[in-house]
Image (cartoon, rainbow, N blue to C red):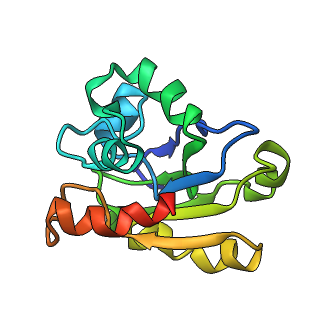
């Protein structure tokens, strides 16, 4: 029986040769895919958390201005999955996942030191990055579906990205 669930493609990485910290999500939610923007859902806390970690209000900037400012802080964004089948935005609905090509990171981001996994789904890839020699952190998810921790509790862990 053929699947009626569409195969979705993720977003291009936001990285450059100076990136030292890479935040990896699992796969963009429906709002992010529709907008073509990382963490576009208005209740997702990623931009607020990064604003606090970097001491610059990225959340107040238009998306097109956020990305160069993020890169100026030597932070990047990407997802562990390049494509998958999924209805809705929940990671638990992901089917037929296809991982991104992380071997390219050594060439594209020669200064990369830290990989922060945004939530448990991307955190499953943390051992792979640790084995490759990167410092890895599994961070509390910024998704509005994961509200068991307060913003301040999440921030306490997210601040380790900058240390």
Q: Position of residue 43 (x, y in %)?
A: 17, 44
Q: Is residue 155 above or below residue 131?
A: above
Image point 76% across, 38% down: which residue?
A: 17
Residue at the farthest right position: 107
> What number of labels is visible?
0
Q: Does residue 106 appear left or right of residue 157 in this picture? A: right
Q: Is residue 100 above or below residue 70?
A: below
Q: Does residue 120 appear left or right of residue 70 in this picture? A: left
Image point 66% across, 51% down: which residue?
A: 20
Q: Position of residue 15 (x, y in %)?
A: 64, 39
- Could you tell me if residue 46 is visible in this image? yes
Q: Position of residue 21 (x, y in %)?
A: 59, 53
- Could you tell me if residue 146 is visible in this image? no
Closer-to-camera residue (39/7): 39
**Displayed quadrant of residue 142:** bottom left
**Displayed quadrant of residue 101:** bottom right
Image point 52% across, 56% down: which residue?
A: 24
Q: Is residue 74 above or below residue 95?
A: above
Closer-to-camera residue (158/5): 158
Image point 72% across, 40% down: which residue?
A: 18
């Amino acid at each position: 029986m053929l699947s009626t669930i569409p195969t979705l493609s993720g977003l291009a990485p936001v990285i450059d040769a100076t990136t030292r910290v890479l935040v990896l999500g699992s796969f963009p939610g429906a709002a992010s895919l529709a907008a073509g923007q990382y963490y576009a859902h208005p209740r997702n806390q990623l931009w607020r958390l990064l604003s606090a970690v970097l001491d610059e209000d990225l959340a107040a900037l238009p998306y097109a201005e956020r990305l160069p400012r993020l890169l100026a802080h030597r932070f990047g964004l990407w997802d562990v999955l390049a494509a998958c089948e999924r209805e809705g935005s929940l990671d638990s609905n992901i089917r037929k996942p296809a991982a991104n090509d992380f071997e390219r990171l050594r060439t594209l981001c020669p200064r990369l030191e830290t990989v922060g996994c945004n939530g448990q789904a991307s955190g499953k890839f943390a051992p792979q990055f640790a084995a490759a020699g990167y410092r890895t952190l599994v961070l509390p998810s910024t998704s509005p579906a994961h509200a068991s921790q307060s913003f301040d509790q999440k921030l306490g862990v997210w601040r380790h990205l900058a240390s």
